[in-house]
Image (cartoon, rainbow, N blue to C red):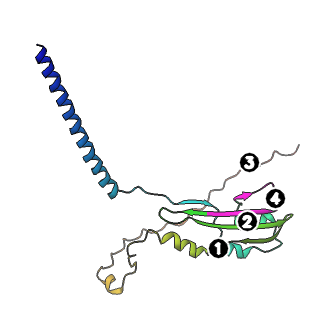
Amino acid sequence: MHVKARCSARLGLVLSIGASLVALAGCSSFDGASNRIANLVTPYKVDVVQGNFVSREQVEALQPGMTRQQVREILGTPLVTSLFHADRWEYVFTLKRPGEDLQTRKLTVYFTGEVLQRSEGDEMPTETEFVATLGSRGNKGKVPVLEATPEQLAKYPASPRPPTAPTAAPLEPASISYPPLEAPAR
């Protein structure tokens, strides 16, 4: 009986080691499959935009002598205002795209009291240039031509339009009498 227990223990040990090896082999094949799937499917990575975009047209619209409110109407609310430097506003714009370098542009506007003194900062792109850089990233295919030639239009006969219903004469508004907005004086 003692020998049977020892054989059973050995058999159980061999089976558990075998099962462990099979499980490890399965994990490694699963790991390889998950790596292959991860190479095929990539997660969407969002562009991170922070701050105020300031265009060249906006900077050119600034004139010394403008009030703070006029500057705010042109450039928007500044990203950074400091209690220690109340005479300047900082406009900072950053754009981080996956796989590309961080784009940063800065503009500082200086005031004397409530009046614009000067502005200085990076060279700003025009609105058209900036929009063109936004669209250039995902356009890998050709843009289809969205115009039809007369020969292409001739292939498709014009469909007859359904007859229109006769229009009735417009109704005259009913005379409505509204009560006075204020109570009569006593």
Cα–Cα span, label 4 and label 2: 18 Å
Q: Residue at x 72, y 58 (%)?
A: 80
Circle nearer the viewer, 3 or 1: 1
Give residue 73's mark: 2
**First-in-chain label (3 vs 1):** 1
Q: Which residue is mark 1?
A: 124
Provide the residue span drawn in magenta: 79-93
> Which quarter of the rendering shows the N terminus?
top left
Cα–Cα span, label 3 and label 4: 55 Å
In-image side of 168 versus 104 (left or right): left
Q: Nearer the viewer, residue 87 or 66?
A: 87
Amino acid at pointer 3: Pro
**First-in-chain label (4 vs 2):** 2
Cα–Cα span, label 4 and label 1: 24 Å
Q: Which residue is mark 4?
A: 86
**Quarter of the rendering containing residue 123:** bottom right
Q: Residues within 10 Å of mark 1 (few under 14, many from 20)?
A: some
**First-in-chain label (2 vs 1):** 2
**Quarter of the rendering containing residue 25:** top left
Q: Position of residue 121 (x, y in %)?
A: 70, 71
Q: Position of residue 145 (x, y in %)?
A: 39, 79
Asked which secondary structure carries label 1, the reply is loop
Check the image and report above or below for 61 versus 76.
below
Circle nearer the viewer, 2 or 1: 1
Circle nearer the viewer, 3 or 4: 4
**First-in-chain label (2 vs 3):** 2
